[in-house]
Image (cartoon, rainbow, N blue to C red):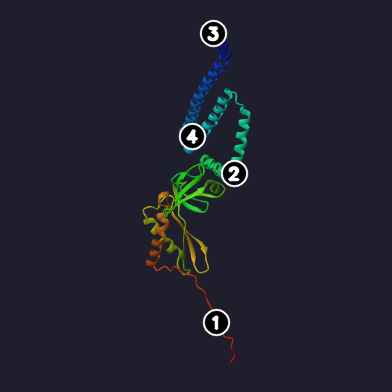
């Protein structure tokens, strides 16, 4: 009699045990396949950076990680579904939580969106000298949320990407050849051809100023007390600041040696004596 009861108990719970074992096995298989697929997709997306070299590899790492987490989320839902969990409510809950988090992190999301655009269009890259968000410096790092600059006085400036993408960006390193604009004023009594000859001699002697394209030296403005020259020598990008900060002194010394006056503003004051004796 006891054997019959035991057999009935076994027969009663055996299907449920088999279902649970089957679900656990299938859940493990789904989990392992999901982990493999997530890693495979992430690797494929990151590998695209070798094909699309004009795009920053940070973008591919971000997209690869995002694809991996999306696949893992579906895998997690599929595993729960194998155990009879109502996943519809979980999906709705995750959607509501995602909306709440998105609203709470609007600033971070705008920086993320701007970071994606910067990494796609690449208006600058690491080691470029740029002006952005009112700051100037060398780009040391670009990530999904911020751009990090190193200034000439060796400060680190961290700028949110949303402030950069929504404003003007000047990339001083984009072109390999740069023109360096400088202005010099001489007195009206001076001969402009002689002034131009002196300036040309200084530019011609400088080792980092290019002969092609030739420097531009012309009268730009007839000012109140001076004749102003626009001087634009061309150089390689790495010599830009050396030219900008050394040539003005060289031209000043050359003008002094040739007795060419560099005027300063004058004001003529006329005194009228209205006393009648």
* Residue contact at pointers 1 and 4, CB within 8 angstroms: no
Marks 1, 4: nearer the viewer: 4
Q: Are marks 3 and 4 in contact (CB under 8 Å)?
A: no
* CA–CA distance in space, label 2 to label 4: 34 Å
Tell me, for residue 3, which label it has, or none: 3
Query: How far apart, in angstroms, are the residues tagged by discs 3 and 2?
Result: 64 Å
Q: Position of residue 191 (x, y in %)?
A: 45, 66
Give x and y (percent) for residue 135: 49, 53
Which residue carries the number 2 mark?
104
Spatial separation of the CA atoms under disc 3 and disc 4: 72 Å
Label 3 close to label 2 by CB (< 8 Å): no
Q: Crowdedness of circle 2 by 10 Å Cα count: few (<14), some, many (20+)?
A: few
Residue at 40%, 55% (x, y): give it.
Answer: 242
Q: Nearer the viewer, residue 190 or 63?
A: 63
Camera-near label (3 vs 2) is 3
Label 2: element kind: helix
The numbered disc on residue 52 is 4
Residue 210 percent coordinates (x, y)? 40, 51
Q: Marks 1 and 4, Cα distance to the nearest angstrom?
A: 75 Å
> Is 93 or 68 nearer to us in this picture?
93
Image quarter where the N terminus lies is top right
Residue neighbourhood size for the residue with mark 4, other residues' Cα within 10 Å, grouped as few (<14), some (14–19), many (≥20)? few
Gap in angstroms between the C-alphas marked 3 and 1:
134 Å
Question: Is label 4 in a helix, a strand or a loop?
Answer: loop
Tell me if residue 47 comes above or below residue 104 in the rendering.
above
**Mark positioned earlier in the residue sequence (3 or 2):** 3
Q: Could you tell me if residue 56 is visible in this image?
A: no
């Amino acid at each position: 009699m006891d054997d019959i009861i035991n057999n009935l108990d076994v027969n009663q719970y055996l299907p449920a045990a088999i279902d649970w074992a089957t679900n656990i096995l299938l859940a493990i298989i789904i989990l392992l396949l999901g982990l493999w697929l997530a890693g495979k997709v992430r690797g494929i997306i990151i590998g695209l950076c070798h094909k699309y070299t004009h795009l920053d590899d940070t973008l591919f790492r971000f997209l690869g990680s995002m694809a991996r987490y999306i696949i893992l989320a579906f895998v997690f839902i599929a595993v729960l579904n194998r155990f009879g969990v109502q996943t519809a409510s979980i999906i709705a809950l995750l959607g509501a939580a995602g909306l709440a988090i998105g609203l709470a992190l609007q600033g971070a999301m705008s920086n993320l969106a701007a970071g994606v655009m910067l990494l796609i269009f690449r208006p600058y890259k690491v080691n470029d000298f740029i002006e952005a968000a009112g700051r100037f410096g060398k780009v040391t790092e670009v990530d999904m949320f911020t751009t990090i600059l190193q200034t000439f006085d060796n400060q680190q400036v961290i700028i949110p990407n949303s402030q950069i993408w929504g404003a003007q960006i000047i990339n001083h390193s984009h072109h390999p050849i740069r023109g360096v604009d400088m202005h010099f004023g001489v007195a009206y009594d001076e001969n402009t051809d002689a002034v131009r000859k002196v300036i040309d001699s200084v530019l011609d002697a400088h080792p980092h100023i290019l002969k092609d394209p030739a420097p531009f030296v012309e009268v730009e403005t007839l000012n109140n007390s001076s004749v102003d020259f626009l001087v634009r020598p061309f150089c390689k990008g790495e010599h830009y600041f050396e030219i900008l900060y050394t040539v003005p002194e060289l031209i000043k010394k050359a003008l002094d040696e040739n007795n060419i006056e560099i005027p300063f503003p004058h004001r003529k004051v006329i005194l009228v004596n209205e006393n009648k004796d």
